Image (cartoon, rainbow, N blue to C red):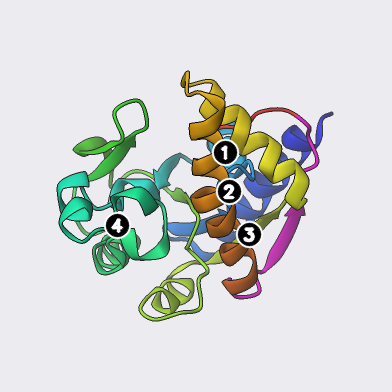
Amino acid sequence: MSSIESNAHQIADIALERFIGANRRVLIAVAGAPGSGKSTLAERAVDLLNEGGAASAALFPMDGYHYDDVVLEAAGRRAFKGAIDTFDAHGLRHMLSRLKANTDDVVAIPVFDRAIEIARAGGRLIPRSVDIIVCEGNYLLAQQAPWDLLKPIFDFSIFVDVDENELRRRLQQRWRSFGLDEAEIARKVEENDLPNGLAIIAGSAEPDLRLKNSESHTLAS
């Protein structure tokens, strides 16, 4: 079994254990730097939970709370999209609280479309019947205000660790897959993505569990 599959099974097992113990909807955080593999792990954990049949699960990516490019252009931050100040932290916090309360029959969440670099409002629906929500994102465990208000909302938190050199390689490969030239890839990785990733690693609160993602191939996020 690959480390991806093994880690995803571990996340699914922990989530199910928390749900059974709480007897209510639970929220699991999967945090990590861009390129750490957190999205792939979270998606696979959700699939495993739904395949198991003991509980229903849904994925909630925090990337839907990116500020729009128009907002970032006006603030002079378009080139640094992905930095902690380019997300709506308060909007994300309120949505997490709403999802955890689980009083609405269905909740529409925004979903980030990487192909067009824009968040689509109402891109996914999460009905009340969902037992476990796996939230994945870069800053879920960030210690600076107001992000530090997120961690207490989660029932369990996980951080995905990746070596810096492997992180750089994955980020480079990600942008190659979008057809960017090497100069633009170097700019994006060295001036934005990698510094953000290192800041996330340094600035995140200690999770309930750390997972080492050592797979040496391209991951979604």
Q: Residues within 10 Å of mark 1 (few under 14, many from 20)?
A: some
The residue labelled by disc 1 is 186
- Can you see residue 57? yes
The residue labelled by disc 4 is 77
Q: Residues within 10 Å of mark 4 (few under 14, many from 20)?
A: some
Report the quarter where the N terminus lies. Answer: top right
Q: Which residues are magenta?
A: 204-216
Q: CA distance from mark 1 to mark 4?
A: 18 Å
Q: Which of labels 3 and 4 is toward the front? A: 4
Of the residues shown, which amino acid type is indicated by label 3?
Ile
Q: Spot the residue most to the bottom.
A: 145
The residue labelled by disc 2 is 190
In this rendering, is residue 37 above or below 100? above
Q: Earlier in the sequence, mark 2 or mark 3?
A: 3
At horizontal 55% and vertical 47% (from top left) the residue drawn is 34
Please provide percent x and percent y for residue 130.
38, 44
Q: Residues within 10 Å of mark 3 (few under 14, many from 20)?
A: many
At horizontal 57% and vertical 64% (from top left) the residue drawn is 200
Q: Which mark is residue 158?
A: 3
Q: CA distance from mark 3 to mark 1?
A: 29 Å
